[in-house]
Image: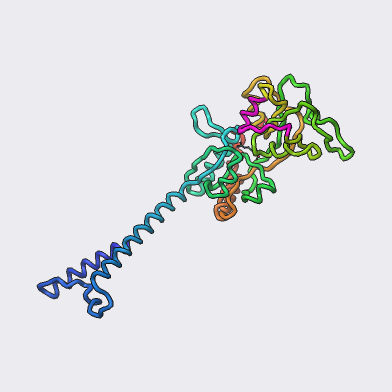
Amino acid sequence: MEFLCIFLLQYEKGCGIIGMRTGAKPVPYIRINLRKGVFNMKKILALLAVVALMATMLCFAGCGEKAEDEVLDMATNAAFPPYEYKGDDGNFAGIDVEIAGKIAEKLGMTLKIHDVDFDTIISGVQTGKFDMGMAGMTVTDERKKSVNFSDTYATGVQAVIVKADSTYTSYEDFYTGFGDDGNPLGTKEGIKIGVQQGTTGDIYCSDEPAKWGFGMSNVTQYKTGAEAIEALKGGKVTAVIIDNEPAKSFVAANEGLKILEGKYTEEDYAICVAKDKEELLNKINTALKELIADGTVAQIVEKYIPSDEK
Ligand code: ARG
C-alpha cells in the first residue's frame, strides 16, 4: 500500500513538473512511455486500478490474518474442576485456564476460551476451528492418530465415586470374579457406571470385563462429569469413574459421596494441537518448559490443589 501511495504521489508530481516545464498544457509524465506506443493512458489507469485493488485486498487479507494470529483459541470443557470450570463470577478458572493464560502471554497472544462438549474438542482442533485443546486431556495412542500432544504438564488417575453409604470398597467388587489370568470374568448384575462421554473413563469402562471394563451396556455416558454425579446422587448409577482431582472436587461440593480406594488407571495430561501446526506446538512446548522450570506451573497447581490436601 505504501509503495502504491508513493507511486501515485510521484506520478502526480511528475505531471506537475513536466506540465510546468512544457508550458501551456500540462503533459503527463506518463507520456514519456506513451510515445513508445507500448501503453496508452487508459491502459495505464486500468492497470493502476487493478494494482490498487490488489494492494487493498492484500492489506485486508494481511490485516485479517494478523488479528487472527494474535488470538489463541483454546477449546475446553469447563465442567472439570480444578482444571477448568466457571467461577461464581462467570469467568473461566482452573489450572488449565491459568497455564493457558501464561502460555498465551509468552506467545504474545490473547487467550480465547471456547467451552464445548469434551468429545468435540479433538475434531475441532483437527479441523482448525481451535488452535489447541486443553481440558485435562489424557494422552492416548488412539488420540495421537488425530492430533499431536504437547509435553505433559500434569498426571491424573481415574477414581471411583460411590455414595457414602455404599458397601463397595473397590471397583474390583463390581466384578463377578477373576479368571486364572487375574482378569475379571464379568460385571455383577445391576452394576451401572456413569462416565463423561468421550473421556478415558468412558473408553476404559465401556471395554469388556476381560479388559477391566464393565461392558458397554453397563455404562451410561453423560455430557459432563457434573451430570454423572447427579445421576449417582439420584441412584441411577452405582458409581462414577472420572479423573481423581475432579472426583475430589465433586465429592467436596456434594454431600453423601465418597471416593473408593485404589487407582483405576494412571494418565498423562497434555495440550493437543492439529498435526499440521508443528510450529505452534513447538512454541507451546517451549513456553511450557519455561513455565515448568521457573515454578509457575507448580505454583498454579498448588493454588488449586494445595499440597496438604494431595
Ligand atoms: N482425562 C480424561 C480424558 O482425557 C477426562 C478429561 C475431561 N476433561 C474435561 N475438561 N471435561 O479423557
**Main SS category, magenta section:** helix
The quadrant of the image that shows the C terminus is top right
Q: Is residue 72 left or right of residue 167?
A: left
Describe the colour scheme in one phrase.
Answer: rainbow
Outermost residue toward the right in this view: 180
Say above or below: 229 vs 39.
above
Residue 26 visible at all: yes
> Which sits in the foreground, 222 or 150?
222
Q: Position of residue 224 (x, y in %)?
A: 61, 32
Q: Quadrant of residue 122?
A: top right
> Which sits in the foreground, 46 or 115?
46
In the image, what residue occupies the spot 65% across and 34% down? 196
In the image, what residue occupies the spot 40% across and 55% down? 61
Residue 244 visible at all: no
> Which sits in the foreground, 241 or 84?
241
Does the magenta portion include 227? yes
Magenta span of residues: 217-231
Q: Position of residue 145 (x, y in %)?
A: 66, 51
In the image, what residue occupies the spot 81% across and 31% down? 175
Does the magenta portion include 89? no
Outermost residue toward the front in this view: 217
Q: Position of residue 235 (x, y in %)?
A: 69, 22
Q: Quadrant of ligand 1?
A: top right
Disc tally is 0
Q: Is residue 154 left or right of residue 262?
A: left
The quadrant of the image that shows the N terminus is bottom left
Q: Quadrant of residue 205?
A: top right
Outermost residue toward the left in this view: 24
